[in-house]
Image (cartoon, coloured by chain):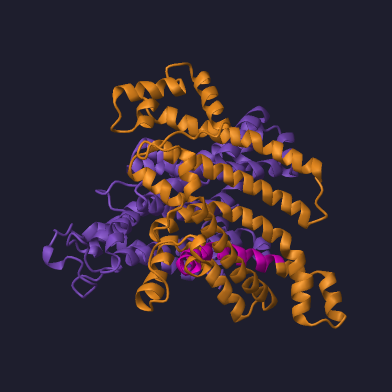
Chain colours: A purple, B orange
Amino acid sequence: MATVTAPDPAGTVSRRRGGFVRSIRALAARPGFLPGFVLFSVPLLAIILGALFLERAPMDNAIRLAPPSLAHPFGADNLGRDLFGHVLRGGQISLVIGICVAVLSTSIGLVLGLIAGFVRVADAILMRIMDGLMAIPGILLAIALMSVAGSGLFNVIVAITVADVPRVVRLVRSMVLSLREQTFVDAARMAGNGTGRIVFRHLLPATLGPLAVQATFICTSAIITEAYLSFIGAGTPPDTPSWGNIIAEGRIYFRSAPWIVLIPGFLIAATVLGINLMGDALRDALDPKVAKAI
Amino acid sequence: MLAFVVRRVLLAVPVMIMVATFVFLIMQLGTSDPAAVLAGDLATDAQIVAIRERYGFDQPVWVQLFKWFALLAQGDLGTSIYTQMPVTRLIGQRLEATVALAVYAMVVAILLAVPLGTIAAWKAGSWIDRAVMIFAVSAFSFPVFLISYTLILVFALELGLFPVQGYQPLARGIGPFLEYLTLPAISLGLAFAALLARMTRASVLDMLRQDFVRTARAKGLRTWRVLVHHALRNAAVPIVTVIGLGLAALISGVVITETVFAIPGIGRLTVDGILTRDYPVVQGVVLFFSFVYVLLNLAIDVIYAVVDPRIRY
């Protein structure tokens, strides 16, 4: 039976929706996406539920360094705190840092990269600065910044962002440099579009896919860098529990209570592995040529 | 060739100047009084004044930067607040442990990753390939301290095969040296091995599709000979570049591994510097590691040109 759908002369709505569903299907079909999604979703769900429903448990001397049990699934730490709630709260901080660093460094990197790719004078200066910043291994740059600025959530986010921005700038710049030579940019220019319009309407959308992939990797490396910084005493302060912080505090009790280190450690690994697998799937879905080569 | 090496060395100089400028600026912009930071929490007013004069902090910024470069050019990285020793001497004392750990980790990574990557490429699509790739993605996602503590729990505390912590210098014999350094080297090497295995697989896979490999097979050569002598040999160049990419990960790993295993190296010196708020030490180590990083990348570029005769700049 033939049916006539709602009037949509150009078919834009259905085409767009169809395209979106197709993209999601293509992404989900990549091997690795589903395990990645599950690995990431489980800790994420636990962290969200923990933030909504878990009360801060009082310190209880009776359960000091208690091993994992039914009453305390993750055991307890040296101060008699139930680790389940403590670790989930730590997860909030670690994820917030990962997401903030990813959003900040891709946004700043995108703007600087577009400038470097389009303005010759700015390019020479910007890229020399970026080369210098990239010559300092990321974690050391963050350590240098943190040792001057002092520990704190905001400082950690800024320090890791500064270390990550140059990589994004390089990526965006190289994409802009190759895109601006393409015929569709010439066509847009011949059609009378100005530089601003070409950048925002034609170049920017083309950079967003690879940038999203890069953002997933920045997010995971920020989660790990935060854990490293807190582990060596240059990260979030002790009253702000993050996964790295909990591991740093549990380090001296490793022989008698290894779960304090191992449980948050495995949660970092699961979250990072999950996001990395999804990032890989996204990259492959966006660029099938790379998928075949790797 | 010589012209290329000279040009590449000259290109590294401005990068190093830029690095030194950044470290200087971090100290300038991050605090209201850099002299107080360099003097430490317990310094007297006289000591702060002395440091202010030494680095010229009461003078215009460009004079300060010039003085900073002049001291660096003489190999002066400042004096530790906590031990009152020159930072260069502190680094020198700890160099052996860090170099030993990094080299051992690199050896572990290469011995593990190159065969695994080659086999994965040879059996592409099989369960072996999938297992190697799962290893590669996982090992790269696991934080170094998780691998370290898991190895300590299993091999040191449960099985008692290795000591839990500590370091024995090479001078006391190769036996104890390796005994203490094996677990740290595996912890540090695994993430590197993951990166290397992935690249080896991609690179060898690319070579296996080439005509000369088909010719070698058609000549009736054995599989291992085709793999090792034809595919792996030609795949070596991209693998060498990955070693350069992984160096940054190796340096951050050194800091963590030395902390977990209580190895008295430069990474541990960094952490002690942070904990005792010994800013000159932190600054000196960051500069030292960054210079080493630039120089190693330079060395890799040169090796790259030597390994692959097609590359002539």
Q: Residue at x 33, y 57 (%)?
A: A243
Residue A256: percent from left, percent from top:
25, 69
Residue B194 on the magenta span:
yes
Residue A171: percent from left, percent from top:
61, 46
Q: Is residue A104 visible?
A: no
Residue B152: percent from left, percent from top:
39, 69
Classify the position of the N terminus of chain A by image quarter: bottom right
Classify the position of the C terminus of chain A by image quarter: bottom right
Q: What segment is highlighted magenta in the picture?
A: B178-203
Q: Nearer the viewer, residue B201 or B156?
A: B156
Q: Is residue B223 visible?
A: yes
Q: Nearer the viewer, residue A28 or A212?
A: A212
Q: Nearer the viewer, residue A229 or A223?
A: A229
Residue B256 shown left or right of residue B103 in the figure: left
Position of residue A135 relative to residue B131, above or below, is: above
Residue A69 on the magenta span:
no
Residue B19: percent from left, percent from top:
55, 36
The number of callouts visible is: 0
Q: Nearer the viewer, residue A255 or A136?
A: A255
Residue B45 shown left or right of residue B226 in the figure: left
**Residue extending farthest front:** B172
Q: Residue at x 14, y 59 (%)?
A: A59
Position of residue B257 relative to residue B125, above or below, is: above
